[in-house]
């Protein structure tokens, strides 16, 4: 069994360059689970190759020193070449490259290889991408391909291809590479609200916009915001939550982002910006002034990018900037415990192509451990994973509608990547591969007035708008 306190995990969590290895352990229940099998297979092959090569070299058989490595690679290549047959393959995809057809025609294609072929325009889907991926098991297998193995090996030591490093310079570059791509690019799928996190669908007729408003309302209610409160949003994206809290709850809100494009959009679309009611800072969360205190702090799907090794640094920063009677809301998306090979394939795709540094995308238990370790008391947890699937589906429909208008500005490979990302993620969230958690907490202090917690539990225990729990907070014993 994998335990948080085990020596291998403790050592890895202290080594930022190895965060992918630590994450694979966190996703595993048993040593035989895919995450651990990846670690054992790759690290074991490296150790065996080196040890065997050194032994042969010392035995005066220098010519044979590379043989252990070539032997391991050869055996895997045989397995890689003869994947399961896919009699229905032609229903879903067509080959545009003769080489690709010769290599993979009639056989299930490893997920990472399918991604490469699609981005390189060597295959095309015979139907809507989402429709095809609904039947992904008919033409895809989930064994790691060579590019994936190379990507994972690069995560084992500091180098330019290692996305596990979380120093300020690397983090700034990663955010710029993704979020400064162009506001028109993100607007094409995020829609009017420009919110890049899960919405909450409360009614059958909710649109993406109304569902995002539902989510922002819930966040503000969970934070128990009241007029005049100072609020901090870490990782504010395009500033929509900052503006919403200022407009509907009359807060004085500061948004923090590393994206210059995001900050520009935020300032242009929030009328109160710069007038004392809301502001946007382009800075690393580690550089937020310690003297600044806030009644409420939110961090919506930003913490995953902090990384495993830096998570306590991040939470301690939150504690430093949070008033003793304040509330902290953290929304995180992570893969599930006991991830199977299908889950791992999607996770590797996301880690390599979409969010390279989001290594703290863990199961729920790790987040709770970290919060409690930092001296934060968890008030409520809400699973909104199925809402994420609905959100992603709306993003996918927006993208497919608006992609033609972007084709002259952005590379075709990037447009195809976004089709694949949004379609596959819609399915992954519905399947439970990954989910999303809304977590509210406060400082673990005896003097904290816990009767306040009752006021914001209605949306979890009753219908939206129900006053059942709000009325309970008026009981004499809670005064």
Image: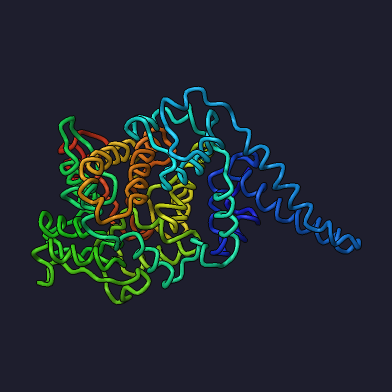
Q: Is residue 468 left or right of residue 86?
A: left
- Residue 46, how many percent across, how many down? 70, 55
* Mark count: 0
Judge whether residue 452 can be spotted in this image: no
Judge whether residue 359 can be spotted in this image: yes
Quarter occupied by the N terminus: top right
- Residue 81, how many percent across, how many down? 62, 37
Quarter of image, res 214: top left
Residue 219 against residue 104 in the figure, above or below: below
- Residue 152, how many percent across, how many down? 57, 54
What is the basis of the colouring in this image? Answer: rainbow
Quarter of image, res 201: top left
Q: Is residue 401 left or right of residue 429?
A: left
Which of the two residues, 373 or 412, is positioned nearer the viewer here?
412
Which of the two residues, 219 or 102, is positioned nearer the viewer here?
102
Q: Residue at x 57, y 60 (%)?
A: 154
Q: Is residue 377 left or right of residue 62?
A: left
Q: Residue at x 15, y 66 (%)?
A: 267
Q: Residue furthest top?
A: 87
Q: Is residue 81 left or right of residue 475?
A: right
- Residue 196, how many percent across, how many down? 27, 51
């Amino acid at each position: 069994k994998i335990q948080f306190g085990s020596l291998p995990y403790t050592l890895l969590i202290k080594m930022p360059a190895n965060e992918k290895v630590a994450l694979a352990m966190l996703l595993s229940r048993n040593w035989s689970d895919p995450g651990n099998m990846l670690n054992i297979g790759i690290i074991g092959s490296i150790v065996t190759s080196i040890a065997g090569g050194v032994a042969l070299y010392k035995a005066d058989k220098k010519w044979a020193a590379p043989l252990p490595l070539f032997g391991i690679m050869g055996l895997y290549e045989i397995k890689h070449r003869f994947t399961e047959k896919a009699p229905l393959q032609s229903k879903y995809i067509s080959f545009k490259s003769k080489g690709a057809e010769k290599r993979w025609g009639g056989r299930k294609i490893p997920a990472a290889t399918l991604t490469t072929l699609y981005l390189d325009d060597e295959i095309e889907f015979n139907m809507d991408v989402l429709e095809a991926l609904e039947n992904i098991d008919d033409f895809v297998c989930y064994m790691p391909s060579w590019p994936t193995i190379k990507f994972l090996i690069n995560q084992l030591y500091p180098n330019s291809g290692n996305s596990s490093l979380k120093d300020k310079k690397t983090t700034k570059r990663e955010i710029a590479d993704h979020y400064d791509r162009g506001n028109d690019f993100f607007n094409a799928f995020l829609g009017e609200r420009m919110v890049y996190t899960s919405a909450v669908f409360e009614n059958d007729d909710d649109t993406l916009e109304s569902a995002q408003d539902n989510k922002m309302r819930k966040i503000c209610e969970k934070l128990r915001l009241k007029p005049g409160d100072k609020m901090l949003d870490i990782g504010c994206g395009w500033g929509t939550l900052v503006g919403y809290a200022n407009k509907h709850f009359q807060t004085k809100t500061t948004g923090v982002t590393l994206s210059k494009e995001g900050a520009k959009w935020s300032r242009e679309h929030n009328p109160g910006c710069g007038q004392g009611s809301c502001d946007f800072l382009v800075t690393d969360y580690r550089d937020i002034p310690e003297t600044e205190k806030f009644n409420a702090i939110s961090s919506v799907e930003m913490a995953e990018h902090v990384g495993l090794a830096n998570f306590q640094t991040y939470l301690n920063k939150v504690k430093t900037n949070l008033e003793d009677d304040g509330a902290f809301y953290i929304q995180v998306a992570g893969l599930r415990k006991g991830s199977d090979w299908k889950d791992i394939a999607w996770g590797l795709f996301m880690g390599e192509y979409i969010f390279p540094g989001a290594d703290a995308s863990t199961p729920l238990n790790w987040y709770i451990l970290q919060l409690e370790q930092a001296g934060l008391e968890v008030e409520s947890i809400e699973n909104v994973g199925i809402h994420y699937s609905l959100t992603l589906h709306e993003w996918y429909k927006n993208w497919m509608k608006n992609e033609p208008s972007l084709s002259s500005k952005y590379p075709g490979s990037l447009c195809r990547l976004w089709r694949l990302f949004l379609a596959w993620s819609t399915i992954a969230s519905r399947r439970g591969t990954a989910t999303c958690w809304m977590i509210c907490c406060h400082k673990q202090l005896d003097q904290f007035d816990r009767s306040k917690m009752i006021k914001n539990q209605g949306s979890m225990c009753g219908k939206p708008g129900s006053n059942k729990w709000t009325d309970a907070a008026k009981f004499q014993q809670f005064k």
